[in-house]
Amino acid sequence: MGLFYTNLTVYRPERQALIGALRGMRREAFVSPTVHGYTVVFDQAIDNQDAGQIQDVGTGLTRELSCTALVAMLHDGDVLYLWLFQHGKMTDHYNSLPQYFDPEAQPGPPEGGNSELICTAFERPDHLTRVETLLRANLLNRELPDVRGDFERHRALATELGMPGFVAGVCYSSIAGNYVPKEFIPKEYEDISFERV
């Protein structure tokens, strides 16, 4: 069985404002400290990889706080999904392996994922070329030898966007169960604490 996780990374609002908004929305979540303008929300309902809940929390938080957020979902270690939310609207969606649930289909290239929009949303225009390469690569064909799978793709994208490294691999259930493998928390964050909402 592969790795499953979902989380939401919010850009710009401080942790306390985010916690207040989550309480107002009656969300059950853990919230990371704010690092370089990014705060990660580990929401219980999106842990089940429910697209409706992802839409609800993404649109609700970004509307309430007038901000940008990226939801990342890794399914069974094989497929990375990304949703970009800006000021209450979903503005982009990415699927690294659209044929995954069709046993008859041949694996093809990823779909969606507007690298220019994503880099602009997170004020990283100088990382556009690498973000585009990471989004477009067909990892089954080993197009990027240094990126073995979609977990590594997510981690590499997070690095390019300036997000804290723990966005890749950590979710609500791993924090609640006090089981966050050390390899998912880069050394500079080993003493991090997540606040429960």
Image (cartoon, rainbow, N blue to C red):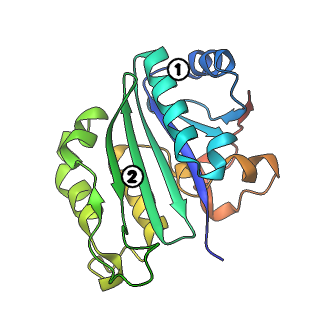
- Considering only order in the chain, which callout, 2 or 1, is on the residue closer to the N terminus? 1
Q: Examine the rendered structure and indicate whether residue 123 appears above or below residue 71.
A: above
Contact check, label 1 and label 2, Cβ < 8 Å: no
> Amino acid type of disc 1?
Glu
Residue 175 or residue 23, whichever sits in front:
23
> Amino acid type of disc 2?
Thr
- Residue 28 in percent (x, y) is at 73, 32
- Residue 27 in percent (x, y) is at 68, 28
* Residue position marked by numbered label 1 in the rendering: 14
Q: How much space separates mark 1 and mark 2, taking CA atoms?
A: 20 Å
Count of numbered tags? 2
7 relative to 157 in the view: left or right = right
Q: Examine the rendered structure and indicate whether residue 43 appears above or below residue 23.
A: below
- Identify which residue is drawn at 60% across, 17% down: 21
Displayed quadrant of residue 126: top left
> Mark 1: which secondary structure?
loop
Q: Examine the rendered structure and indicate whether residue 49 appears above or below residue 11.
A: below
Displayed quadrant of residue 144: bottom left
Q: Where the C terminus falls, by quadrant?
A: top right
- Identify which residue is drawn at 54% across, 40% down: 52
> Mark 2: which secondary structure?
helix
Q: Where the N terminus falls, by quadrant?
A: bottom right
Other-residue count near label 2 (Cα within 10 Å), few / some / many at <14 / 14–19 / ≥20: some
- Identify which residue is drawn at 72% across, 38% down: 193
119 relative to 156 in the view: left or right = left
- Identify which residue is drawn at 29% across, 75% down: 138
Displayed quadrant of residue 196: top right
Q: Which mark is residue 159?
A: 2
Can you see residue 35? no
Other-residue count near label 1 (Cα within 10 Å), few / some / many at <14 / 14–19 / ≥20: some
- Residue 139 in percent (x, y) is at 34, 77
Can you see residue 95? yes
